[in-house]
Amino acid sequence: MANVLVNAPKTAKKGEIVEIKALIMHVMETGYRPGTNGRIIPRNIIGDFTATWNGREIFRMKMSPAIAANPFVSFAAIASESGTIAFRWSGDEGFVAEHQVSITVT
Amino acid sequence: MTGLRLAAVLLAVFAASFALAQGDPRRSGYREMGPALQKMQDDDAANPAMLFVQAGAAAWAEKAAAGKSCADCHGDATASMKGVAARYPAFSAEAGKPIDLEGRINLCRTTHQQAEALAPESDGLLALSAYVALQSRGQPIAPPDDARLSNLRAEGAELYKRRQGQLNLSCANCHDDHAGRKLAGATIPQGHPTGYPIYRLEWQALGSLKRRLRNCVIGMRAEPWSYDAADYLALESFLMQRAKGMAMDAPGVRP
């Protein structure tokens, strides 16, 4: 299982703007670097990151080789209803990581 | 509050801030960083080292092949490991010699868990040392008052002042004589080991104090010692003594 750290408030008022932070362990190997044997190390990056709130997409990001290892993403969302915020990272070499948190909106 | 008491309080506040301004000229690497990096370190949701801490916490509870986990003997790390990283390197009676925190963790693995030692700079060792070091956050660096460490510290002090490498520089040339000034784009810190292991942006990874020292030795165009060389232990012991009383900020972020 991938190593993920997600930080989102557990409760929010309806209509409030909440900050969501997501950090994931990943090498983000660019595909441009030669290894110790002189050969190019194959690209191995996360390509897509998405977040959904009760199944509805609230954030999407395309990642590129210029993004450093262990990418950190922070974004804002409007708290509309109680439920689940789900995160998904996917990329090269069949990489998939999923994580979810619940939030109560009053 | 009477006028007299107010005056006394004001005097106390003044005295405290005066001591802060006048007293200790030592500055941690944290204080040399810009606000963006300081924020990154301070926010546990943004500090990438916390990914390793999370892995370390899981490893702490994991049973070794021989059946015991770190937690089985040491219990809750937030209590049992508090302040521990702040007093290493220390003399180990079990090993019969001084060891650093990584050495202590590996000693527990080999003698108490009948497991293999974790390789230097391996994710597994870094994760456990980050998890243990986190428990000393905010604690003053407290090198043991132990005569068995004196020789090692003296060796470290000597190494620190010795010119070496093609550039013929000593550690002191940069970290004492030119601290606070620029070396290319980087601010030269005083070189205090308050934040280890650190997440260094240049490495895009977590690394130990040894790795940091290796980088400086390579920067001096000297031959870096292998990870098990006693020279690192001597420098680590000296640097911890030099930073005695400074607050730990592990796991740190550094440029």
Image: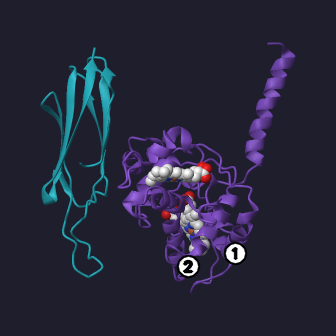
Chain colours: A cyan, B purple
Q: Which mark is residue B220?
A: 2
Q: Nearer the viewer, mark 1 or mark 2?
A: 1
Which residue lies at the image location 18% right of the left edge and 69% below the top edge? A42
Residue at image coords 15%, 27%: A54
Q: Nearer the viewer, residue B146 or A12?
A: B146
Q: In the displayed structure, would residue B21 be above or below residue B176?
A: above
Q: Chain of mark 1?
A: B
Q: Amino acid at mark 1?
A: Lys
> Can you say whether B152 is above or below B71 in the image?
below
- Decide: few, some or many residues near mark 1? Use Cα within 10 Å; few <14, some 14-19, many ≥20: some
Furthest residue toward right: B4
Q: Which residue is mark 1?
A: B161
Res A74 → quadrant: top left
Residue A33 at x, y = what percent?
26, 73
- Name the residue at 69% across, 75% down: B161
Report the amino acid beneath label 2: Met
| Residue B130 in sight | no
Q: Residues within 10 Å of mark 2 (few under 14, many from 20)?
A: some
Q: In the displayed orientation, state which residue is furthest to the bottom.
A: B166
Residue at mark 1 to residue at mark 2: CA–CA distance: 13 Å
Tag 2, which secondary structure? Answer: loop
Residue A100 appears at what percent x and percent y? 23, 34
Residue A40 position within the rendered picture, expressed as x and y whole percent measured from the top left: 21, 76
List x then y, in percent, for residue B100. Answer: 57, 62
